């Protein structure tokens, strides 16, 4: 007899299942009826349901066709046998000749030796496998794709029965951790710095879908269309909301994300699930579970992040579809005053659903620094630690937590002394911040009254409000690559122009040094093949890429020129190793300026062209360079890397040499001296400029412009205001010939003796 497949077959089966589920009897009795029904419908001799028990063991709970004595007796570990394999990989398996498969584990009590073919699917709930549904036949049967899909749809309905708590206790369904009540320290990856102390709130976006099987597929398609329309409107509202009105990188994120709501593939997959007999909400949930499972197998970080966005969207759509269903979504009103969210992962808009004033931190089982929710958390100043293995298993709702973003660790139920230590450091931080805030309007002047320019390093539009908040003099380094990295493709000239214009508008007349695209090495673009390089930091990166692909640089320069129409434009090129490279890049800029003039478009009022100095070779052509540039910015991060031949991204050696070594300081002194003699402004924009002791040394070398992250402006200003330049200059003069590894301790002693705030 030919098995019944296709959408209509699946619909019929679902209809019958619904009747069984709604009927009387215990959960086990219902499960028995269900396996019978499936076996009959799929023309199979066997249909069995395995349920996950504590300790990652799959237990046979019901079977049609295998020996009844095996029920509750046959048990397989996850990964053991074909059933265990389906659970381990959370994916279906269809085998015409199952017995010859190397993983086949024969269990005599089942009497299954006569069954040759097997198809099984995982039963999934909330992204976890909670059971396996298996069908077997005596003949060598090739199961069709439709049959596998039908079984998957059925498994979804069965998931409700398994998860109801009537078959096994809820506590068995939840993953357990033996040490649940002991204090734990968990290590992860730093996604945003800072410390937060609070109480765990398990982020549970899941909405309970009660109506699974549909009466009328057309009506459900209509509900889906309406739900999608409401979802799009809600996203538009979110985009327009007051909170996000100042624009910024996270606005770009949400806009990209909004496009997913129009993703034809996603909508089509939901449509297919509806045609197989599910309600609109059950269809969304099915596609959503499939996505979750796929996500756990995708390794490409970019793709994973996009899948997270889709998952977030699925949750919102579910909310639209069952939003009226009272109690379907957990209320967020009871969010404690000091909530630390714990989740597997989270979409960007889900974070915005919470009252940010009550959020103290975010802990995720997954995550990477470029994922959208991390970018948003940075904008909201919420510490985040990601890739905490089994966070949801180890942390219970209400557990006291400390999120230490600085050191990428999370303390669960910390002991009193640890809690007190972090609380004290938070208090000290708050006090320091209050002092720095008070200093905001005081000038960055040394004690004898010399003005030092303190500038900001920025890379996201949301950094711009920091100009006013810190009282900085401008943006000394604008890293333009961030928006290139956050998008699925190269932004075009119009998009770039708009972005750069917004930045200049927000800078309100303060100078912004735009650095052209500096990608490659650790900053990879998802849409560009990077190629395998043995030494990417010394590889095809930065200006080398943009000179090889001049159209990319020309488009960026075109956008910068257009954005700066009528205003001053500062442009600098990264990773320049020789004057000829600077000249090639500047020629492209001149071509773009000529283009604007020939088209009678308004040019910038003045264009200042500079370069980063971060490759030592360039310093040895400094005189030729100084005749051609308007300013120089020293990138001490890369410069140190190339001076000492030490990979800045390798924690094992990155701290081995000190920027305060006589070698580095001699080199810097020489560069700064030549710049000053030629009357060319020079600044330092690497990390060293933002650390008070290093910045003090830079003042001693003659540097008068420092560019740093916003959080460094207060501490560096405090140092500047307590320093006398002649004193530090004469102190440093005696240190350049020392054979020492570093002059750090001598500088620290000098600062303490002279009352300098470091
Ligand atoms: C530097 O190298 O010092 C620098 C500022 O550039 P980035 O850190 O972006 O490489
Ligand atoms: Mg650099």
Image: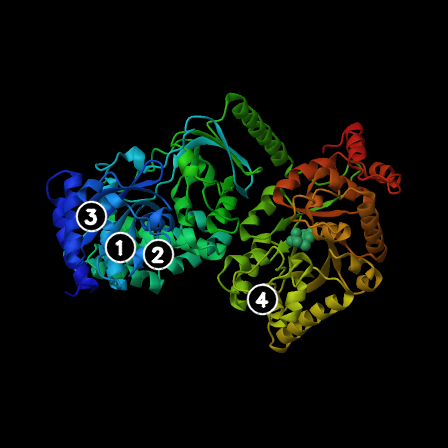
Decide: marks 4, 2 in contact (CB < 8 A)? no
**42 lies left or right of 447:** left
User: Does dot 3 land on a helix, a strand or a loop?
Assistant: loop
Q: CA distance from mark 1 to mark 4?
A: 50 Å
Q: Which residue is mark 2?
A: 101
Which residue is most to the bottom?
Answer: 598
Whether residue 246 is visible: no
Which is in the foreground here, disc 1 or disc 4?
1
Q: Percent x, y for residue 63?
A: 19, 46
Q: Percent x, y for residue 48?
A: 22, 48
Q: Which residue is mark 3?
A: 66
Q: CA distance from mark 1 to mark 2?
A: 22 Å
Disc 3 crowd rating (10 Å Cα; few below 14, some 14-19, many 20+) is many
**Going from the N terminus, do you reach mark 4 or mark 2 first?**
2
User: Does dot 1 land on a helix, a strand or a loop?
Assistant: helix
Which is in the foreground here, disc 4 or disc 3?
3
Residue 161, which numbered label?
A: none
Q: Percent x, y for residue 261?
A: 35, 59
**Going from the N terminus, do you reach mark 4 or mark 3 first?**
3
Q: Which residue is mark 1?
A: 152
Which is in the foreground here, disc 3 or disc 1?
3
Which residue is most to the left?
Answer: 24
**Going from the N terminus, do you reach mark 1 or mark 4 first?**
1
**Going from the N terminus, do you reach mark 3 or mark 1 first?**
3
Q: Which residue is mark 4?
A: 559
User: Does dot 4 land on a helix, a strand or a loop?
Assistant: helix
Decide: marks 1, 2 in contact (CB < 8 A)? no
Whether residue 641 is visible: yes
**624 lies left or right of 317:** right
Count of picture labels: 4
Looking at the rendering, the quadrant in which ligand 2 lies is bottom right
């Amino acid at each position: 007899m030919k098995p019944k497949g296709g959408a209509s077959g699946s619909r019929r089966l679902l209809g019958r299942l619904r009747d069984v589920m709604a009927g009387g009897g215990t959960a086990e009795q219902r499960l028995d009826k269900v396996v019978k029904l499936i076996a009959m419908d799929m023309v199979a001799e066997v249909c069995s349901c395995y349920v996950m028990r504590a300790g990652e063991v799959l237990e046979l709970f019901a079977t049609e066709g295998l020996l009844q004595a095996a029920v509750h007796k046959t048990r397989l570990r996850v990964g053991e046998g074909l059933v265990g394999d389906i659970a381990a990989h959370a994916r279906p398996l269809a085998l015409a000749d199952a017995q010859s498969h190397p993983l086949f584990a024969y269990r005599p009590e089942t009497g299954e030796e006569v069954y040759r073919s097997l198809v099984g699917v995982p039963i999934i709930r909330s992204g976890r496998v909670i059971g396996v549904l298996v069908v077997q036949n005596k003949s060598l049967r090739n199961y069709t794709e439709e049959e596998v899909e039908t079984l998957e749809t059925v498994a979804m309905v069965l998931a409700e029965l398994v998860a109801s708590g009537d078959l096994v206790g809820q506590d068995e369904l939840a993953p357990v951790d033996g040490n649940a009540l002991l204090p734990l320290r968990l290590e992860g990856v730093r996604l945003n710095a800072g410390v937060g102390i609070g109480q765990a709130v398990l982020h549970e976006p899941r909405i309970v879908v009660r109506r699974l099987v549909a009466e009328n597929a057309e009506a459900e398609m209509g509900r889906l269309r309406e739900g999608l329309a409401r979802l799009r409107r809600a996203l538009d509202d979110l985009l327009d909301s007051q909170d996000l009105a100042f624009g910024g990188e996270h606005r770009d994120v949400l806009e990209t994300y909004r496009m997913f709501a129009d993703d034809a593939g996603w909508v089509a997959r939901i449509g297919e699930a509806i045609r197989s007999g599910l309600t609109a909400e059950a269809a969304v949930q099915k596609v959503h579970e499939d996505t979750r499972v796929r996500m756990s197998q995708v390794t490409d970080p970019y793709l994973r992040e996009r899948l997270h966005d889709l998952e977030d969207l699925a949750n919102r759509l579910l909310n639209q579809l069952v939003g009226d269903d009272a109690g379907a979504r957990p209320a967020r009103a009871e969010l404690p005053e000091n909530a630390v969210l714990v989740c597997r992962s989270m979409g960007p808009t889900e974070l915005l659903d919470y009252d940010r004033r009550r959020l103290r931190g975010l802990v995720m089982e997954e995550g990477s620094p470029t994922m959208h929710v991390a970018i948003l958390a940075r904008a909201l100043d919420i510490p985040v630690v990601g890739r905490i293995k089994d966070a949801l298993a180890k942390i219970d709702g209400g557990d006291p937590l400390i999120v230490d973003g600085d050191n990428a660790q999370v303390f669960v139920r910390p002991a009193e002394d640890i809690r007190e230590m972090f609380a004290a450091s938070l208090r000290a931080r708050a006090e320091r911040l209050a002092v720095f805030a008070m200093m905001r309007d005081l000038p960055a002047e040394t004690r004898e009254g010399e003005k030092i320019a303190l500038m900001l390093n920025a890379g996201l539009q949301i950094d711009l409000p920091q100009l006013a908040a810190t009282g900085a003099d401008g943006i000394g380094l604008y890293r333009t690559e961030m928006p290139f990295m956050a998008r699925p493709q190269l932004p075009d000239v119009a998009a770039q122009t708009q972005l750069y214009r917004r930045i200049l508008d927000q800078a309100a007349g303060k100078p912004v040094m735009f650095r052209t695209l500096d990608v490659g090495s650790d900053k990879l673009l998802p849409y560009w093949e990077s190629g395998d390089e043995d030494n990417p930091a010394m590889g095809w990166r930065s200006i080398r890429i943009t000179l090889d692909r001049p159209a990319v640089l020309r488009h960026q320069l075109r956008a910068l020129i257009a954005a700066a129409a009528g205003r001053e434009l500062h442009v600098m090129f990264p990773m320049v190793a020789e004057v000829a490279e600077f000249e090639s890049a500047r020629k492209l800029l001149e071509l773009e300026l000529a283009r604007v003039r020939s088209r009678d478009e308004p040019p910038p009022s003045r264009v200042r062209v500079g370069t980063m100095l971060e490759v030592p070779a360039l310093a040895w052509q400094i005189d030729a360079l100084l005749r051609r540039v308007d300013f120089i910015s020293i990138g001490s991060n890369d410069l140190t890397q190339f001076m000492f031949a030490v990979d800045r991204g390798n924690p094992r050696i990155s701290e081995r040499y000190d920027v305060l070594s006589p070698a580095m300081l001699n080199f810097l002194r020489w560069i700064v001296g030549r710049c000053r003699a030629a009357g060319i402004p020079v600044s330092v924009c690497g990390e060293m400029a933002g650390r008070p002791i290093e910045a003090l040394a830079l003042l001693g070398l003659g540097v008068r412009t420092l560019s740093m992250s916003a959080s460094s402006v207060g501490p560096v200003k405090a140092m500047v205001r307590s320093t006398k330049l002649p004193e530090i200059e004469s102190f440093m003069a005696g240190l350049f010939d020392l054979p020492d590894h570093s002059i750090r301790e001598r500088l620290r002693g000098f600062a303490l003796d002279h009352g300098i705030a470091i």
